[in-house]
Image (spheres, rainbow, N blue to C red):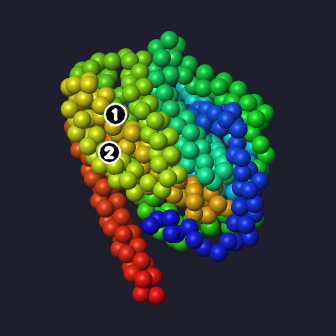
Amino acid sequence: MESSATQRPPSPAGTAAKSAEADNASGPGPRTVRLMSVAVGLCVAANYYAQPLLETIARDLHLSSTSASLVVTAAQVGYVAGLVLLLPLGDLLERRRLVCGMTLATAFSLALTASAPNSGILLAGTALTGLLSVTAQILVPFAADLAAPRQRGRTVGTVMSGLVLGMLLARTASGALASVGGWRTVYWVAAAAMLALTAALHRMLPRYRGTAGLRYGQLLRSTARLLAEEPVLRVRSVLGMLAFACFSALWTALAFLLSGPGYGWSDGEIGLLGLAGAAGAIAAQAAGRLADRGRTTVTTAAGALLLLGSWWALALGAHHLAALVTGIVLLDLAHQGVHITNQSLIYALRPEARGRITSAYMTCYFVGGAAGSALAGVVCSQAGWEGVCALGAALALLLCLVWAVTAGRHAVAGHRRSAGGCRG
């Protein structure tokens, strides 16, 4: 029933967006989609290099575990600011120029983090990188705009698989590089990669100008109005926020569990565990294909229940590696299933406003991530891994309850509409 929210008289901007879609009926080429997937992965990875290195960074800069966890929170807060202030520009400016400018600036912010002499500069560089790395979220609706409507879910799923791999393999890459050259090497290499990415994007991305026809202030206000006007966007934003809070709570606390006395792993070994979460990339593509077939209710329900069940395995993982790996795989599958389904639904709402819709949704999403990482840092220091698992299970249960209530309302509304139609 969620798709019923998409029916409305077309606005002039919407007509322009539909014309743009018609012009791109064949969709972007495979090489362009792959490059966009790689770009999304590298952009989002910048926010996650620190997670397996928190203990090492804490020792190097003489920080407590709670203070070190603020590196993750700073990245999430910066990202939220970018989602609010920068992401709506995708509906206004020429996107290739905007994307390339932001990836170039991200390279410099990563270099600032690499050279940080103290925690203040480290947090500033991390927050600035988070602010700029919303480039990933400009590229996702960009891909949706370029794709043919019948292939939009698959294209978004493919590009989002790069985001999933970026989030997870960032930990593996950072752990390996830190083992060789220290944690600063991770950020120097990442800065060089962003410079190379800027050149590739400038060469291969097509020019595409947004159709919003608004000034910047109007653009920001209209983003807030979208949340008030679109019930599907509101519900999906809450679900995404809770799912990402679970994800962030896990990966913020995991480094402390694995580096502690129970496991005693090195940075490189901790980073390798990120490979277990790569299953989320499979879920991203599968969820995209199911969304193209209209199976969004099934994927959401399955993801919500799987997310709740994953925390039981993670709790056992305090002493059993197999259970820990199982829990990570289940949580990443569930998180991505919910997230891709959310995006497939919200991108169908208003084609001319995909940048602002993404801004509204992803702002809520990363507010959840920042809250999850901050809470996990506090809970981990006070109650250990068991407390983190209780926190994650509570967040997952809340997601299940929100979905059950809102799905029931949609079902009742659909029944009433059907009954009214029969009487008519």
Instruction: Provide the residue designation for mark 1.
Output: 328
Most foreground residue, 57 or 256: 256
Q: Can residue 185 be seen in this view?
A: yes
Image location (x, y in percent) of residue 182? 50, 16
In primary-sequence order, the first of circles 2 and 1 is 2
In this rendering, would 3 be left or right of 301? right
The residue under the point 46% across, 45% down is 287
User: SS at mark 2?
Assistant: helix
Image location (x, y in percent) of residue 196? 70, 26
Q: Answer above or below: position of 416 versus 56.
A: below
In this rendering, would 55 be left or right of 86? left
Q: How crowded is mark 2: few (under 14 residues within 10 Å), some or many (20 or more)?
A: many
Most foreground residue, 336 or 40: 336
Q: Classify residue 407 by image quadrant.
A: bottom left
User: SS at mark 1?
Assistant: helix
Image location (x, y in percent) of residue 30? 67, 35
Instruction: Provide the residue designation for mark 2.
Output: 307
Most foreground residue, 389 or 56: 389
The residue under the point 42% across, 83% down is 422
Image location (x, y in percent) of residue 352? 67, 62
The residue under the point 31% across, 24% down is 258
Q: What amino acid is labelled 2 in the image?
A: Leu
